[in-house]
Image (cartoon, grey):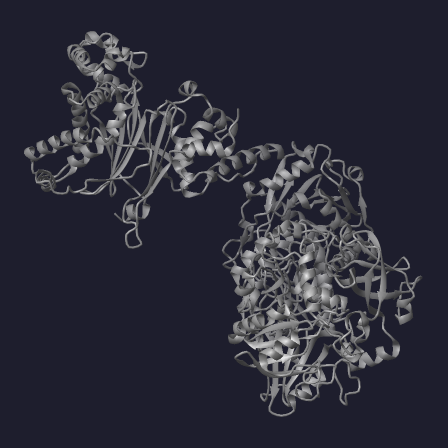
């Protein structure tokens, strides 16, 4: 009954606003479930059809119509804002660790604030502020990191003492607190009403809204959306936007060409109470107690409190209509631990009377980040879903970015961390999703320390050497479903206690990785890098070369057997991908990209390669095992195994040759290592993998060979100032901005994608510059370690953020990589960043509120590392990724 | 002095035993899935006994608990011998002949029972020959009596009980040249034991009960909740029918002295029992046997003591009351337990605790606030209590152990209180009997699929 009450509450409010679109559907609206006639027929066609009338669908409609698209139809299977949006707790919080999420929340807050004025619909917006509590020092560190990011964004935020907490919220028990973060501008809204306000505004801008209309499937022809089939007929359209919330997965799978949207619902509970004797003020700050796994907001003089339990209850695994949302049961036993946490935090509430326990399912994604973007397989099929219970915080910003994406072809910010194409079919298994979201939901509250890994859904993709490496002490992490070695625990050394690795300080693998790095520098190491994405592109004539020359910035018309490092740039010159391409023959190329590029790069190329049956692109990732032999003795190992001279004269840097290794023939050997160290990568047909690995390890013994992992690789590449796509490089970074001009052939005799933008940058200068920082007064043993996302200060002023960091065992210092901007001191306008600007500053890096002096460098310490190598080789290898 | 949870567990689990009916061809075709049993002593040594065996020459499984008094000798003898008497009573004529011929010609005997014993459940080696001879006499009589009719389980049970008690009595009267055995048979006869035995064969469940142990069926209702059905009647002063029976069997003049302070002749709690010849033999017989018996017997004040108002023996019988029940799919388990359990727990709680344990589902009505006025504090208290109830389940791998944990450790809310459990288990021997009795429990789990298919 109280649930009905909630519904009525918001209905009354939006009815008062008399939205124009209401007249288009039935005039007799009631809460009964009897079907009503649809007086307004669906249009036969529209430019855009949006499925889902929750906060996401209405936000997309709102923003699209604001940007000038008018021919939009929004379809809702039930009633507007009646799904998760209806039951959501309505907390708008900007305290988000991921920068793009923070930006979305910040924008949402600003949008909602003025929405009532804009639309006349009451949104219940109330700026209450929020207090995030820390029960432990580690939690306080993580809050301080968030506070640093908020501050440089210009969002007021402070770390406060427990005493100050009581002043802000008298009910809080502070005896177990070490501190808290206060964000005064965080807000509360009625989420259903925000959604209705957005719908009202969109409707005024011409968007047609049809309730009680469900989409059965989307039709796709020749890789393009052509229309949607609904229970009320077909609508032809160019664009389809799947904002179906927890049904997005199923809707994605309903068409002939499935669109994989990996999300899964979990039950989510929150408690509503009657008002206190002295009703709580509606301006009382929202309290988030992550160590207690709960949040508490004021609600009609009482409280609304929910949380993210350790043992979530996934649901709808078998699909929809197993259970109607409205019929979900309260489960007090399940809520018990959260209730304990609530009473521990606010003991004064013991006598407060319960109104209801609301069960409101939320959808979660495999990596705790939302899903937006265009399907890699169906053009015009856009998705915005999987909000991980932060839908109201992200709604405004996410809708804006998606609208920009549809209208302009790309959003105004780097949304790669949220891009649908970071996932593929492999994350779409129901079992995987069910298991993973059971880990993700508790993670909402768990402390996230550097280098944490998911524990569920593991060992899906593995190298054929997996067991062999595991037996030798490998510790694993996962990327795009692929198991990769972090480092090897030496025999005899005690198994590392996982808890000790979970620290913001020096981790316990420090010496282990140090010795792997040393071995790479002095002898030879083997790293299994099989996870990298590998494509082969070939043609009968010159089609392959011609197409690739247009799509890649470097000159690929090199002699057969050469390897080229090159960016795959967009129109603005930004990196869509960063890869190495080997010319196998006149007409065929072998392309190596980062692991998580498998879907994105494929879609990017498919979309742009000419539709020519004589031009063939094949994903051969699964066909090859890649062994990276790093170190000065790699030459000796390989030449002994192949009876072929491998010295620089015979096998120069950036060279590719098929040869025999041991008994195995046809091994593709490339003289690159992704680290700047000398060595080779062997691309081995998988059936030979074990043989070649055994041969290499046996032969390598006398040269001191050992296994190494990605942590060693990472330390090596960062001290060499090598940028990594997805971490340092993104679609908003050009080669000019990261010192990679040498990887661009502006005059290769033909046009290429991004060329104009680069030429312009070359002329006008760049507005940010990739810079390497060496921490000066940082004590590796005692101080907090940098991670990424730390603010960079130049002469005391914020100029940018770090994108990655690692300890350099050679320099015995921490190295951070990041971008330096030049903001005008008065206007904040972005100015050109010159070499002098970089070189003439005093720099500090802010790690969780503590600033460390740093030396900025635009070029790596070439002399320090490369006694044995010529300078031009160093520059040529100025490429990396992980 | 305080026992840690592992110490508590090691005490509780010392006597636990589990048996799973082996699967045949990947399927268990028996109506019994298996059973869990356990004992917790209060007396030193414990006076309770338990037995479980599969009948090999007929179908069916036998399970029983035996509560001894005035020592454990009688309970021990009954636990070793009764199932053989029952099995023999059930055997068809041909099988009896076959067995007799085998014994006669010194051939290997057909095995009659497969025992399921805890290592602590011992059989007397010294008396086995004596016991065997008595049993052989019984089956020889059965062969001679050959009625040609199929054996009725109810009758077989009653006959076996009575025959064994008779043999116990006779053996004591006749005595044995071996002085050890002579003393043993007298101790068996002068001590007593109740017996509660289940015979399960397909859907036919027979309970034969003598005394105040109890058999209870755990039934799962359609809504998933648990209820208890009694399958035995206690033979004690609380049972009107039993009191009436005793009064019927003796002259009106004894009416007042028969049951005093809820005890038979003011002395004995159970109204039916094995042994206890002091309540069965004439005074003359008792005196003669004691005088000719060994000195230890003569020195024993209890055995020499003749019950007051002892006019028309026998006052006591071992004849069981037999209840037959056709198993239904909703009958999930059977609990056989000595009165040590039933003194502390209501059968309804027993049904719920075992039911939830066996199904692993804690069917607690979900809490719904509805229109009630409930505060956060009240709800919190309620949830904490419910959690405690559930968490106690996971410590035990044996349903009988789990029941004992509750029987001994339950607080006023019906949840296991570790402190209480620790105190009860660390009582010194001499005090333990004042706070609790020996507890013996067998929990038999039924195979609903098989039962449903009948």
**Can residue B60 be seen at all in this image of the molecule?**
yes
Quarter of the image for residue A276 reads top right
Q: Report x, y in % for residue A99.
A: 75, 60
**Residue at image location 41% in from the left, 31% down from the top:** B404
Q: Report x, y in % for residue A88.
A: 65, 51
**Residue at image location 28% in from the left, 55% down from the top:** B25
Pick whichever, A103 or A43, lies toward us.
A103
**Residue at image location 31% in from the left, 54% down from the top:** B26
Horizontally, residue B111 falls left or right of residue B435, namely left
Q: Report x, y in % for residue A576.
A: 71, 74
In the depicted structure, whether residue A789 falls above or below residue B411: below
Quarter of the image for residue A418 reads bottom right
Pick whichever, A291 or B453, lies toward us.
A291
Pick whichever, A237 or B206, lies toward us.
B206
| Residue at the farthest right position | A826
In the depicted structure, whether residue A106 falls above or below residue B241: below
In the depicted structure, whether residue A254 falls above or below residue B58: below
Q: Report x, y in % for residue A828.
A: 89, 63
In the depicted structure, whether residue B90 falls above or below residue B282: below
| Residue at the farthest front position | A702
**Can residue A49 be seen at all in this image of the molecule?**
no
Horizontally, residue A698 falls left or right of residue B150, namely right
Horizontally, residue B41 falls left or right of residue A675, namely left
Horizontally, residue A569 falls left or right of residue B10, namely right
Q: Give the number of callouts.
A: 0
Quarter of the image for residue B273 reads top left
């Amino acid at each position: 009954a109280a649930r009905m009450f909630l519904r009525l509450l918001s209905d009354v409010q939006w009815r008062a606003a008399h939205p124009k679109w209401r007249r288009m559907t039935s005039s007799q609206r009631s809460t009964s479930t009897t079907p009503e006639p649809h007086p307004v027929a669906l249009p036969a066609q529209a430019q855009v059809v949006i499925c889902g009338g929750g906060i996401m669908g209405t936000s997309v409609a709102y923003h699209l119509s604001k940007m000038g698209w008018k021919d939009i139809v929004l379809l809702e299977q039930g009633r507007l804002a009646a799904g998760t949006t209806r039951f959501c707790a309505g907390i708008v919080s900007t305290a988000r660790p991921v920068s793009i999420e923070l930006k979305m929340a910040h924008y949402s807050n600003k949008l909602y604030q003025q929405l009532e004025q804009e639309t006349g619909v009451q949104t219940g917006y109330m700026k209450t502020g929020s207090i995030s509590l820390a029960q432990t020092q580690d939690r306080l560190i993580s809050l301080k990191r968030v506070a640093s990011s908020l501050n440089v964004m210009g969002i007021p935020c402070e770390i406060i003492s427990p005493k100050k907490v009581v002043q802000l919220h008298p009910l809080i028990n502070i005896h177990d607190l070490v501190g808290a973060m206060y964000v005064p501008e965080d807000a509360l809204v009625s989420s259903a009403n925000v959604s209705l306000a957005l719908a009202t505004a969109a409707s005024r801008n011409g968007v047609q809204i049809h309730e009680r209309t469900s989409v059965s499937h989307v039709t796709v022809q020749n890789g393009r959306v052509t229309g949607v089939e609904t229970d009320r007929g077909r609508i032809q359209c160019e664009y389809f936007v799947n904002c179906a919330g927890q049904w997005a997965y199923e809707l994605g799978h309903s068409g002939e060409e499935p669109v994989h949207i990996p999300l899964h619902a979990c039950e989510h509970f929150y408690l509503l109470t009657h008002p206190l004797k002295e009703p709580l003020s509606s301006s009382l700050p929202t309290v988030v107690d992550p160590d207690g796994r709960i949040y508490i907001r004021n609600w009609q003089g009482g409280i609304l409190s929910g949380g993210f339990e350790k043992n979530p209850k996934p649901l709808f695994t078998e699909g929809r209509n197993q259970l109607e949302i409205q019929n979900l049961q309260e489960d007090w036993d399940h809520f018990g631990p959260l209730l304990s946490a609530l009473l521990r935090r606010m003991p004064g509430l013991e006598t407060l009377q319960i109104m209801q326990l609301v069960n409101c399912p939320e959808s979660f994604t495999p990596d705790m980040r939302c899903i937006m973007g265009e399907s890699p397989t169906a053009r015009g099929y856009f998705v915005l879903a999987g909000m991980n219970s932060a839908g109201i915080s992200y709604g405004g910003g996410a809708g804006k970015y998606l609208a920009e994406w549809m209208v302009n072809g790309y959003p105004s910010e780097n949304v790669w961390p949220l891009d649908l194409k970071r996932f593929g079919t492999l994350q779409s298994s129901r079992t995987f999703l069910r298991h993973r979201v059971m880990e993700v939901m508790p993670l909402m509250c768990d402390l996230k320390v550097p280098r944490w890994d998911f524990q569920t859904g593991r060992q899906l993709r593995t190298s054929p050497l997996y067991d062999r490496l595991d037996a030798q002490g490998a510790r694993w992490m996962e990327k795009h479903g692929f198991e990769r070695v972090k480092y090897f625990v030496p025999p005899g050394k005690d198994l590392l206690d996982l808890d000790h690795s979970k620290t913001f300080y020096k981790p316990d693998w420090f010496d282990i990785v140090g010795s792997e790095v040393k071995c790479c520098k002095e002898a030879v190491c083997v790293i299994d890098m099989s996870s990298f994405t590998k494509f082969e592109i070939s043609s009968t004539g010159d089609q392959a070369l011609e197409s690739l020359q247009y799509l890649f910035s470097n000159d690929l018309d090199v002699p057969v057997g050469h390897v080229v490092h090159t960016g795959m740039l967009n129109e603005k010159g930004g990196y869509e991908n960063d890869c190495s391409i080997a010319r196998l023959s006149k007409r065929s190329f072998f392309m190596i990209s980062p692991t998580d590029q498998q879907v994105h790069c494929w879609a990017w190329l498919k979309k742009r390669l000419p539709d020519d049956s004589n031009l063939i692109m094949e994903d051969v990732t699964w066909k090859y095992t890649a062994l990276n032999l790093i170190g000065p003795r790699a030459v000796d190992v390989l030449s002994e195994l192949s009876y072929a001279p491998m010295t620089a004269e015979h096998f120069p840097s950036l060279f590719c040759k098929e040869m025999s290794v041991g008994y195995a023939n046809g091994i593709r050997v490339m003289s690159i290592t992704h680290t700047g160290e000398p060595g080779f990568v062997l691309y081995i047909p998988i059936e030979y993998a074990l043989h070649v690995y055994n041969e290499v390890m046996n032969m390598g013994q006398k040269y001191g060979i050992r296994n190494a992992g990605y942590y060693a690789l990472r330390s090596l590449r960062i001290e060499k100032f090598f940028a990594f796509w997805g971490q340092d490089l993104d679609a908003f970074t050009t080669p000019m901005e990261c010192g990679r001009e040498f990887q661009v052939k502006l005059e290769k005799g033909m046009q290429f994608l991004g060329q104009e933008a680069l030429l312009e940058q070359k002329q006008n200068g760049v507005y940010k510059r990739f810079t390497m920082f060496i921490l000066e007064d940082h004590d590796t043993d005692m101080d907090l370690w940098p991670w990424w996302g730390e603010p960079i200060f130049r002469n005391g002023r914020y100029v940018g953020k770090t994108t990655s960091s690692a300890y350099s065992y050679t320099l015995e210092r921490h190295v951070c990589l990041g971008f330096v901007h030049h903001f005008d001191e008065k206007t904040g306008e972005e100015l050109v960043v010159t070499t002098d600007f970089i070189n003439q500053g005093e720099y500090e890096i802010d790690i969780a509120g503590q600033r460390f002096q740093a030396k900025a460098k635009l070029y790596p310490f070439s002399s320090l590392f490369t006694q044995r190598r010529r300078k031009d080789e160093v520059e040529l290898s100025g490429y990396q990724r992980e | 002095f305080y026992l840690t949870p592992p110490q508590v567990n090691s005490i509780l689990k010392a006597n636990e035993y589990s048996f799973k009916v082996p699967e045949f061809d990947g399927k268990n075709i028996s109506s019994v899935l298996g059973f869990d049993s356990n004992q917790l002593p209060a007396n030193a040594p414990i006076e309770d006994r338990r037995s479980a065996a599969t009948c090999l020459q007929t179908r069916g499984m036998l399970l029983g608990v035996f509560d001894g008094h005035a020592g454990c000798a009688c309970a021990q003898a009954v636990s070793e011998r009764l199932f053989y008497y029952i099995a023999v009573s059930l055997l068809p004529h041909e099988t009896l002949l076959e067995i007799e011929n085998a014994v006669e010609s010194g051939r290997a005997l057909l095995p009659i029972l497969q025992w399921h014993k805890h290592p602590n459940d011992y059989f007397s080696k010294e008396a086995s020959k004596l016991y065997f001879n008595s049993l052989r006499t019984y089956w020889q009589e059965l062969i001679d009596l050959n009625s040609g009719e199929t054996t009725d389980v109810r009758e077989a049970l009653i006959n076996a009980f009575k025959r064994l008690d008779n043999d116990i009595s006779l053996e004591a009267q006749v005595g044995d040249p071996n002085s050890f055995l002579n003393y043993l048979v007298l101790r068996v006869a002068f001590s007593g034991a109740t017996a509660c035995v289940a015979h399960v064969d397909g859907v036919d469940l027979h309970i034969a009960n003598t005394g105040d142990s109890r058999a209870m069926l755990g039934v799962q209702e359609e809504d998933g909740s648990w209820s208890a059905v009694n399958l035995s009647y206690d033979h004690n002063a609380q049972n009107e029918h039993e009191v009436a029976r005793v009064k019927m069997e003796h002259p009106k003049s004894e009416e007042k002295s028969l049951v005093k302070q809820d005890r038979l002749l003011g002395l004995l709690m159970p109204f039916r029992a094995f042994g206890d010849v002091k309540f069965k033999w004439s005074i003359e017989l008792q005196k003669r046997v004691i005088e000719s018996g060994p000195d230890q017997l003569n020195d024993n004040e209890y055995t020499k003591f003749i019950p007051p108002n002892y006019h028309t023996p026998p006052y006591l019988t071992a004849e069981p009351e037999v209840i037959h029940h056709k198993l239904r799919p909703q009958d999930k388990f059977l609990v056989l337990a000595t009165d040590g359990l039933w003194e502390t727990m209501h059968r309804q709680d027993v049904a719920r605790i075992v039911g939830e344990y066996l199904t692993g589902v804690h069917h607690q009505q979900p809490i719904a606030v509805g229109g009630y006025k409930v505060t956060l504090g009240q709800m919190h208290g309620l949830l904490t209590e419910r959690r405690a109830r559930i968490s106690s389940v996971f410590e035990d791998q044996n349903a009988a152990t789990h029941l004992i944990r509750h029987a001994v450790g339950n607080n006023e809310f019906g949840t296991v209180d570790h402190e209480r459990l620790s105190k009860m288990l660390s009582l010194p021997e001499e005090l333990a009997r004042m706070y609790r009795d020996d507890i013996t429990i067998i929990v038999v789990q039924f195979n609903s699929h098989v039962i449903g298919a009948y």
